[in-house]
Image (tube, coloured by chain):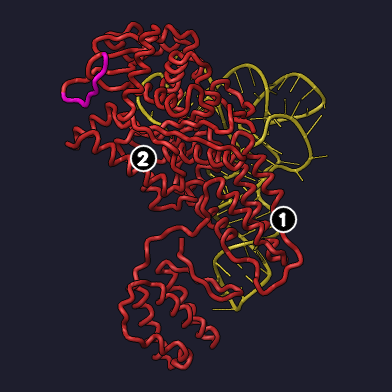
Amino acid sequence: MKVFNTLSGQKEEFSPQGDVVKMYVCGITPYDEAHLGHAMSYIIFDVIRRYLKYRGYKVKYVQNVTDIDDKIIDRANKLGISTQELAEKFTASYFADMEALNIEPADIYPRATEEIPKMIEVIQGLVAKGYAYPAQGSVYFRVRNVPDYGKLSHRSLDAMRSGMRIEAEEGKEDPMDFALWKASKPGEPAWESPWGPGRPGWHIECSAMSLKYLGNTLDIHGGGQDLVFPHHENEIAQSESFTGVKPFVRYWLHNGMVQLGEEKMSKSLGNLITIKEALDKYSADAIRIFVLSSHYRSPLTYSEEILEAAERGADRLRYTANTELDDPRIKYNYVFDADSYRHRFIEAMDDDFNTAKAIAALFDLARDINRASESGYSVAQAQQVIRELGGVLGLTLKPPQFKPLEAEPFMELQKAIIAKIREEKLDHVIEKIASELDQPDTGVKTAEPYINSLRDIRNALRSEKKFQLADEIRAELDKLGVTLEDTPRGTVWRRKR
RNA sequence: GGCGACGUAGCCAAGUGGAUAAGGCGGGGGUCUGCAAAACCCCUAUUCACCGGUUCGAAUCCGGUCGUCGCCUCCA
């Protein structure tokens, strides 16, 4: 199994330190709704984690929640609520989004505000070793003491200094030095520290948390490409300087950015599609297929058209995964063997998580299952394989959840149709089902019984070759979002996409 | 300005030196059906931004041109 390591800039053979893969992925700053960029990142690392487990590894997955920082303070002030309240609200919202996207929860979600002692311990250690210095109530990391600073983002300190667009903060020895601890201004949330009241800098929490929950060396550290510099670069500097152990991380994995039109989707640009907005229109499976159908390190462009395409693709996989294709009345002589597709899938995923190729194998498998089924093979086992492999990608392949249908329009339609039947003196056609139709209103609020009875009426009309009225029922149901399909095993209906 | 990535069919996208350039969506034709739908079958890039070069052989390697994007500042 090979993975692309940002540190080396190459694909490397993956070999974790032990039986348990130690995996850390940068989490959110909960001050607003999560958007598709977050969805991409967390779907990808969810798939990586699922795949590692599929390949027999145990995984310990830690994801932080940055529940205190400048943006949280700003937003909380604007809304007139506490930072805590704000962070809790959007953390809960984020967890709901993750669940809706079928992303498995991390084993641990440490909160920055709950890990202050560990952070202070690390900062003190860095100060003691000369890697950090206090200044005006803050503490800064001394970048020039780390000779290999820049190794992850592949740039030199000199190049970075020349590209600096902001002025050096007061108290810093070097413009590239970054804050480990920030002195608090009056009125801001603050924690006691050896340097006075303040709050942690952004980068230190990941170092402290990964150290505390996963140890000195992680196997996998993930995040978006926009975190490579400065965030992850700084994490390396802090962690390796503090522990004296290299490497801090064996494999650095970074996903590409979601684009909206020509630009990166980001909070600062305000060109966001939130996960909730996307889920209003598309199934979780479609969103996952959208994300996984290109390579995780490439940029991903969002458009309605592409999501539509993903949804239709999801429909096809769902059909093959869930339709009862084997006829229980038949004794099959031939069984369709899906093993070669599983091998293709694994081969693709082993090559730096080539999910696009893996999905292609899934689509081939779906088509070949359908074909084999039509040719008289038993395909139930192969259907199990497609569900298994879909599961590795976190696809449920279940029918998408729709808002419940309103009963009213279907009730009206049924009345109208019955009226027409009586008008055309076709009562006898529906005699058999007439008795149940005439039952008094039992206060049923769901649409399903009405759809079922309309389907039965239509079938009764079809058997009498009254196709005009039968087709009218089908057309009217279609308008109400219900598609009828006449299959060899009877007429089924499903929600229209 | 510095560093990096990318440019493959109408759209999305895999492929990074060799035999017919994956897969999805869309489009066209067909099978099935009373008609549909779904499913299945066939067709839909002689060519991989452009120009040169290396090679018996290049979408794939090298050089140049054009174009797009990311990072260098909070960001998944």
Foreground of the two, A337 or A167: A337
Asked if the magenta segment contains residue A52, the reply would be no
Callout 2 secondary element:
loop
Q: Earlier in the sequence, mark 2 or mark 1?
A: 2
Instruction: State yes or no: discs 2 and 1 in contact (Cβ < 8 Å).
Output: no
Residue A8 location (% of width, % of height): 58, 20
Please rate how many residues cluster around mark 1, counting C-alpha atoms within 10 Å: few if below 14, some from 14 to 19, many from 20. some
User: Dot 2 falls on which chain?
Assistant: A
Give the magenta part as a residue range: A187-194
Res. A227 mark: none
- Residue A313 can be seen in this image: yes
Q: Which amino acid is tagged 2?
A: Ala
Which picture quadrant has residue A184? top left
The residue singled out by tag 2 in the image is A34
* Image-based side of A407 in relation to A49, left or right: left
Shade representing chain B: yellow
**Predominant secondary structure, magenta span:** loop
Q: CA distance from mark 2 to mark 1?
A: 42 Å
Which picture quadrant has residue B51? top right
User: Dot 1 falls on which chain?
Assistant: A
Q: Residue at x 47, y 47 (%)?
A: A287
